Image: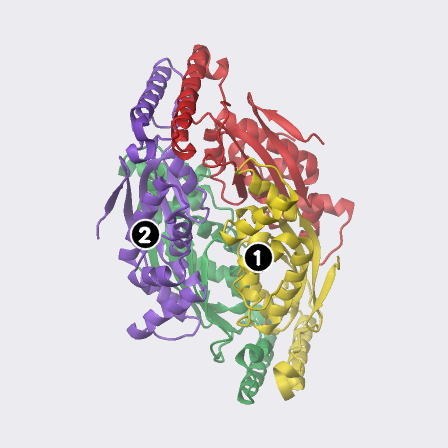
Chain colours: A yellow, B green, C purple, D red
């Protein structure tokens, strides 16, 4: 399995680790019935759980991702409350000049104008730091296109909710690109669950089996 | 009770509504023992709950606040996952030129330099919108000092956790100012609970009874 | 509005209080767009939110219920984790002889046999207490049909999830009866939200507009 | 590491799997500072996090346990909402005659009296099933000492809250025995975290380093 997927101009999603996979969802679902696993029945079971909205067995599958993304993407992402975030601090670290600069399809002829504005903001940031202003104050001038990074630990049920909202044409393009990377890692590590999700429970309009 | 507390240069906290108060915490705590309320015993009960870390009765007290604060403050605030947020959207609305500009105690001689940087960013934002760039793209150049606004519904237990972390000298000055406003509304609407919290369960180093 | 609905042979649901109602959902949803309320638009807004799965504004509506129900119903109910429970304690209080005895439609000719079994268990409980055994030990012989009581504070989003699962023919009859009472209080206190929920977002097969 | 710990007369806790361990807490905590791991600093970091109540890095450590315990213990356990439960169903499976019978230290001379009461209840259960009553109805006569089983997936932060409340002399003896088994698995799989927890953050009065 690929470990890192590049996203946007300087970002990425890395799968740090996955815990359980299809197997643990099947095992924990079967305890309701005290029944044993068999390959044929397992596939059917996952389908049935997904169709009937019995999503709690999927909570036992847990992922940790390492993400690098612009702050406006982080803002949308962190609204998903069921999961754990550990993020780089703008109080304890100094930022590098790493901004997301949208390309022509997004910013048309204004790409350079945006790049310049971001660069100017960064120059101010540097000069503030140089004159002894605290990092936590200086960063206030930095734009929302600044790249940040974080760890995200999330169970498969909450991840599916994330995909329902973020792999959808109504989601902003930039977070959708990240969500597509998350979906790819999900499909590779939990093929049965992913397939049943997209067929029977998915509410978005982008993913396909 | 005062309904709005001004915070920083252009922000505020409004208490939209409070649900229950001291009474509901006492009532729900007493169900464990099937005992009846009496004024003397109530105060002692709240103290005992707080000292022993039995915080679940305080979950039945619920607040809704309306907050206007800079985005870097919102970023810290939204990390508190137990609670509900509804925020103004930068995709569906156009921002006004409203930035938090720190004063001399924070930015020394650099106040004007910061104000100028923010103004320049806003000029770019306006020119991007004028040339037809989408709001969701144009806002990427806006700095984290931009004011946003949101509703926050939170129970008293989660609110006390917020105060533990944010009314503390280790918290950044700006969010601490907001947290002080939250504490004031809390103390006025739930005097018994607030008093017991600060005396027996508070982990910060700023609040006093 | 009716304050108490009787459920099963000795149970009930009481609406202790409701916070916000349709109005707060509309108000908090409108902040995204910074738009103002108008009666015609409000109804349409609630419908749109519900159809598109934008359920966070409904988190600002909060209910507190007081419930008396058998322990096997409580066990199913408490699985709904987003919400606050304060329950009578079997360690700190002594139970009365109050059991749910299913009627003929559930227990056929065995009604009396069940009643006798429950009564015998209660006789043992009393004799254990009399001989000085602790309440927390003596209650181990009591059956799951024993009535208990609790406060439940829950927001409307979580309440709708509860209704999706519990007002459904697959739910056990007894908890379904309680869920019908919850639905009735919900419909009376939030008519717009309830109507939109049942029309556009409800996954069960029992409720009707 | 031992995989199963026997608890009470017929119960147990099994560690199904653990995700991350001390290493992931250290790694995710270090992202705040963008600093690198070193053995000496790691131990100090864990101590500092624990002393200052910075518990979010510990959310990235995840455990799955398999537990067999009486229903009255399950009732206390399931009150811990941050975590995932998948439990055997009394609607879809038929129970065996497996009850927790407290020993003399708990029930004195009444041990046999309790055993008989439980056996009689089980005889009624069997006769109800035999006459065609549904499992979901018949089980209403079964006492709370009945053994059930479930999977529990929980992060280390929530697990520490569980230990704060359940490895304490105020907790009921039976759940405390289970909590001691959980603590043992925790100490063996995350020695640094466990040691710092007991020294600097533990609120109970039973665990020792």
Residue at position x 51%, y 50% from top?
A: B205
| Label 1 secondary element | helix
- Identify the chain of the residue marked 1, using the numbered disc in the image: A
Residue that sits furthest to the top in the current view = D109
Disc nearest the viewer among 2 and 1? 1
Give the number of marks: 2
Residue B91 x %, y %:
51, 75
| Label 2 secondary element | helix
Residue at position x 48%, y 62% from top?
A: B177
- Identify the chain of the residue marked 2, using the numbered disc in the image: C
Residue that sits furthest to the left in the current view = C1
In the image, B21: left or right of D17? left
Q: Are marks 2 and 1 in contact (CB under 8 Å)?
A: no
Residue C59 x %, y %:
41, 58
- Spatial distance from mark 2 to mark 1, Cα to Cα? 29 Å
In the image, C35: left or right of A169? left
Q: Say which residue label 1 marks.
A: A197
**Residue C46 higher or lower than C149, as above or below:** below
**Residue B151 higher or lower than C96, as above or below:** below
Q: Is residue D209 in view from this perspective?
A: yes
In the image, A1: left or right of A106? right
**Residue C15 higher or lower than D148, as above or below:** below
Residue at position x 61%, y 25% from top?
A: D6
Badge 2 crowding class, 10 Å Cα cut-off, few under 14, some 14 to 19, many 20 or more, is some
Q: Say which residue label 2 marks.
A: C183
Residue C13 x %, y %:
29, 43
Badge 1 crowding class, 10 Å Cα cut-off, few under 14, some 14 to 19, many 20 or more, is many
Q: Nearer the viewer, residue A119 or D28?
A: D28
Q: Nearer the viewer, residue D19 or C116?
A: C116
């Amino acid at each position: 399995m690929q470990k890192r997927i590049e996203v946007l101009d300087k970002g990425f999603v890395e799968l740090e680790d996955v815990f359980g996979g299809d197997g643990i969802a099947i095992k924990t679902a079967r305890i309701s019935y005290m029944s044993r696993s068999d390959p044929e029945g397992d596939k059917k079971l996952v389908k049935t759980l997904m169709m009937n909205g019995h999503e709690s067995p999927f909570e036992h599958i847990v992922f940790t991702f390492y993400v690098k993304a612009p702050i406006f993407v982080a803002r949308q992402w962190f609204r998903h409350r069921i999961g754990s975030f550990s993020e780089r601090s703008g109080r304890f670290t100094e930022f590098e000049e790493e901004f997301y600069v949208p390309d022509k399809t997004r910013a048309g002829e204004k790409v350079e104008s945006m790049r310049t504005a971001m660069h100017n903001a960064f120059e101010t940031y540097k000069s503030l730091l140089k004159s002894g202003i605290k990092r936590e104050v200086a960063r206030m001038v930095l734009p929302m296109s600044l790249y940040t990074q974080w760890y995200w630990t999330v169970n498969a049920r909450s991840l599916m909710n994330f995909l329902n909202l973020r792999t959808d044409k109504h989601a902003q393009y930039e977070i959708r690109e990240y969500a597509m990377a998350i979906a790819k890692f999900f499909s590779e590590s939990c093929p049965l669950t992913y397939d049943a999700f997209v067929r029977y429970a998915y509410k978005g309009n982008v993913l396909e089996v």
